[in-house]
């Protein structure tokens, strides 16, 4: 009798857990569907989201590109201690990848991605301009080798420059600004600073519905403010797709998502305003410290009309299409983006070849196309004040006003 009772209890417990699992699976599928419809969510972007098996078989790279397998192996080693893509803490609300040495990825002093072709010979440094890049994973070089990051490609195009890559995974423009402030405290001072931003500001705002804050801010806030160890029920409630679905539905019924288009327009306007403020701050500092800032508004997968079959597939995995569209509409119709910003959102308008590796990142060829535009922008800035010799394509060596040493502005 006792055995039969235990068997009956075990059977019902088993049915309960099986039913719970099925409900969780259904809730996850429904949540994904609603998220693709741009109903607000606060999903934390994790490393696993950036290493989807689909991305490993993309048409942006051929079968002969065996280095990509080595690249993913190194990524696994770099982030092996964390499921997050951003796992090493830095002061002032920043993060970075840990130091690492591999065949495809090298993260060196100050946790900066290695820039190939740059000569740090102290004697030759005085004869070259110093260019510092700031931005998110596009600058850092997600999905590309050291030699094919945007800073490395620029270094291969210019033998008159020393390039530093201060990009970090996931950074929004405000974090780039903070990193820039920390950088200019130290010598040698940069002569040109380049900021590549846009999409991360949009995506971070899409997550939290607040413009100007970092990615994963809501989940980080919850962890920071948690005072007690969670109970099993509280842990399940936080992780459960069922509870997440109920929260989403209740928000919708309470009118928080009454007009997604209006919400997008308001949020998009706030994103642009926040970004423009950062541009203004950097320009003011540039005038004080006597260097040239270049601001790049980057193209996204939504800006490429001639998508490959693969690109079309992964584009639908990028959940903030509507918000990106609202931002682009405001920029194109209202001219609200700062006049100091070079808007390259239409850079890939005529390209039919594969350029995106995943919903967020370019392949090496796309990096080259973008770097060519940046190189042209540098030439324009250097020529504005007659800094180029009429007889040479290289800058003229002059005395630096801050250090007193020989350098090129």
Image (cartoon, helix red, strand yellow):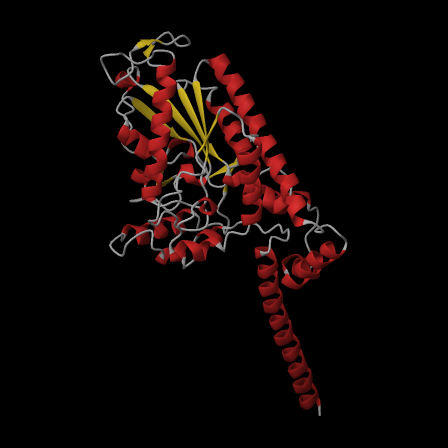
Rendered image quadrant of residue 146: top left
195 in relation to 122, above or below? below
Rendered image quadrant of residue 12: bottom right
Answer left or right for 273 relative to 114. Answer: right
Check the picture and name the quadrant holding the N terminus.
Answer: bottom right
Rendered image quadrant of residue 35: bottom right
Check the picture and name the quadrant holding the C terminus.
Answer: top left
Q: Which residue appears farthest toward the left when viewing the image?
A: 391
336 in relation to 301, above or below? above
Seen at 35% across and 58% down, the residue is 57
In this view of the protein, can residue 149 be seen by the observer? no
Q: Which residue appears farthest toward the right when viewing the image?
A: 254
Residue 127 position in % (x across, y down): 28, 15
Seen at 40% across and 42% down, the residue is 349
Q: Nearer the viewer, residue 141 or 77?
A: 141
Answer left or right for 234 relative to 175. Answer: right
Seen at 42% across and 9% down, the residue is 402
Q: Nearer the viewer, residue 301 or 409?
A: 301
Residue 266 position in % (x across, y down): 66, 39
Residue 371 position in % (x across, y down): 35, 33
**Total label count?**
0
Residue 221 position in % (x across, y down): 65, 43
Q: Which residue appears farthest toward the bottom when viewing the image?
A: 1
Answer left or right for 258 relative to 348. Answer: right
In this view of the protein, can residue 396 be seen by the observer? yes
308 in relation to 103, above or below? below
16 in relation to 259, above or below? below
């Amino acid at each position: 009798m006792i055995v039969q009772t235990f068997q009956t209890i075990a059977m019902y417990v088993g049915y309960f857990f099986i039913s719970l699992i099925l409900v969780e699976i259904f809730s996850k599928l429904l949540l994904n569907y609603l998220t693709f419809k741009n109903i607000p969510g606060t999903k934390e972007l994790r490393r696993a989201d950036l290493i989807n098996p689909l991305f490993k078989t993309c048409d942006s790279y051929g079968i002969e590109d065996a280095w990509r397998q080595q690249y993913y192996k190194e990524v696994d080693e770099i982030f092996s201690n964390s499921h997050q893509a951003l796992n090493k803490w830095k002061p002032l609300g920043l993060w970075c990848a840990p130091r690492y040495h591999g065949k495809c990825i090298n993260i060196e002093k100050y946790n900066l991605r290695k820039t190939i072709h740059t000569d740090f010979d102290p004697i030759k440094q005085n004869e070259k301009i110093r260019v510092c890049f700031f931005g998110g994973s596009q600058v850092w070089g997600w999905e590309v080798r050291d030699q094919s990051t945007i800073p490395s490609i620029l270094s291969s195009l210019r033998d008159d420059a020393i390039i530093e890559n201060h990009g970090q995974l996931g950074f929004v423009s405000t974090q780039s600004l903070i990193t820039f402030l920390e950088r200019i405290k130290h010598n040698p001072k940069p002569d040109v600073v380049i900021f590549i931003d846009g999409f991360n500001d949009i995506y971070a705002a899409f997550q939290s519905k607040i413009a100007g804050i970092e990615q994963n801010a809501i989940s980080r806030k919850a962890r920071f403010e948690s005072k007690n160890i969670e109970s099993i029920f509280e842990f399940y409630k936080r992780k459960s797709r069922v509870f997440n679905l109920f929260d989403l539905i209740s928000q919708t019924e309470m009118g928080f998502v009454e007009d997604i288009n209006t919400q997008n327009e308001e949020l998009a306007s706030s994103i642009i305003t926040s970004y423009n403020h950062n541009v203004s701050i950097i320009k003011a500092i540039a005038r004080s410290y006597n260097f040239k800032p270049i601001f790049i508004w980057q193209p996204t997968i939504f800006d490429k009309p001639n998508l490959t079959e693969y690109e079309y597939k992964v584009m639908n995995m990028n959940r903030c299409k509507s918000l990106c569209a609202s931002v682009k509409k405001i920029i194109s119709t209202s001219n609200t983006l700062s006049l100091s910003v070079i808007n390259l959102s239409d850079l890939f308008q005529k390209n039919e070849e594969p350029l995106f590796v995943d919903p967020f990142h370019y392949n090496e060829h796309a990096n080259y196309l973008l770097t060519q535009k940046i190189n042209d922008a540098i030439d324009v800035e250097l020529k504005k004040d007659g800094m180029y010799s009429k007889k040479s394509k290289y800058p003229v060596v002059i005395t630096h006003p801050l250090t007193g040493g020989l350098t090129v502005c």
